[in-house]
Amino acid sequence: MSGFFTSRWVPRPDHVAEAADDTLPAGFRAAGVAAGIKPSGALDVGLLVCDAPDAVSAARFTSSAVVAAPVQVTRERARLDRLRAVVVNSGNANAATGRLGLDEAARVQGAGAMAAGVAAEQVAVASTGVIGVQLDGQAVVRGLLAANGRLSPDGAREFAEAIKTTDAIDKRVTLDVELPSGRVRLAAQCKGAGMISPRFATMLCFVETDAAMSAQTADLLLGVCVKRSFDRCSVDGQLSTNDTAILIASGAGGVRIEPETEDELRFGEALDALLRQLAILIVRDGEGAARVGRVVVRGGDGRAVEAVARAVADSPLVKTALHGGDPNWGRIAQAAGAALAGGAPVPVDIAIEGIPVCRGGAAVRVDQARLDAAVARDEVEYEVRLPGDGAETEVFFSDLGHGYITINAEYTT
């Protein structure tokens, strides 16, 4: 399968097509430059600007109790429903940096406002990289001066490159979406490969559309779609300090999405598919990863279903088995049992790629050759059924191999 929608778990909606060009939605310009934050000299400062004065926006952030300075500044000093610019740096998370880190983030916000020609309260700031190292805010400011001169409707590629850290896969796309009221454009740039956990994956994601909508509609759509995408993926079970997802709607395309209409439904389907595919790309790009797993858990207790799904997705035993193509379903049973510890024996059913391997807590006879072939795929699905009906959840997760250890053992050097 080629193109952006590469996962069998996220089919492309019929009314969505990848754009023939890489131009951002109407009303947006972007740029990426090298400001010297990354020792490699790679692009490390990105600037995204919406030129539409009536743009609306929505945002979601990390649930971590240790919150990076740019997240704090954006939450406290920006109007999250009226954002018109985003300043991003990679190579330094500006997290656990105290008062100085907050001052630098605020300085970057002010410089971003000057570069974008908007009020400071309309600028979001985001950072990604090493935690606990002071950010050279002046370097970011110099980068913004350079980025201002490079802003272009065709700048998505450079912007997306500037926000990467250990990413090996390009996570951006521009889509054309056919709505009953007309065509709109939807684009996104995303980064994330390590320190990924459900409860909002460790990532940055910026979404742009030229559709018009209310701030309430933007907030509803982003919130629902984040819960079905970035909240549903895990690489290493580690919650980040910097997670940020922002949707900005310029309204410059001439199509307005009204609440509770077919337009809203179809746009929501497009945004949902976009973010779910990005979440899977993050998992596929999990540091050193070779395979992607999906665990689906069903049963009558929503809390138990969620606990089991996360336990399986974050189990190093399950993840290493996925990496090695080992159909050792006992590791799935162990993770489920650990998540439900303290209760009565639970008669779980387990299947791998639709092949039953356990019923009522007991092994069943399987075609071993068929099972071995199933777990050798790039994408492997695990199903766990608990007693009862009514609840269901899923988590996408990466395998765990030698590459993850190598990357993270050498991360700061």
Image (cartoon, rainbow, N blue to C red):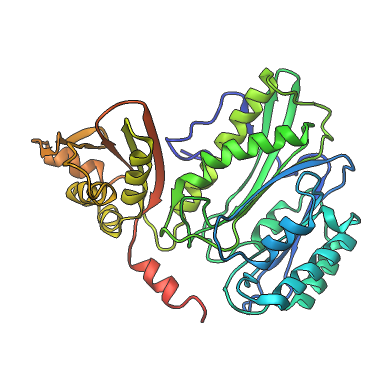
Q: Residue 69's image quarter?
A: bottom right
Residue 3 visible in the displayed image? no
Image location (x, y in percent) of residue 223: 61, 39
Q: Residue 371's image quarter?
A: top left
Residue 124 visible in the displayed image? yes
Viewer-proximal residue among 17 and 395: 395
Q: Is residue 91 above or below residue 315?
A: below
Image location (x, y in percent) of residue 327: 20, 47
Q: Residue at x 34, y 37 (%)?
A: 296
Q: Is residue 318 above or below residue 393?
A: below
Q: Residue 391's image quarter?
A: top left
Q: Residue at x 79, y 68 (%)?
A: 106
Furthest residue toward left = 365
Q: Is residue 324 above or below residue 102?
A: above
Q: Residue at x 83, y 52 (%)?
A: 122
Q: Tag count in the figure?
A: 0
Furthest residue toward bottom = 413
Image location (x, y in percent) of residue 185: 72, 35
Q: In the picture provided, is 32 more to the left or to the right than 308?
A: right
Viewer-proximal residue among 171 and 72: 72
Image location (x, y in percent) of residue 386: 26, 34
Viewer-proximal residue among 377 and 396: 396
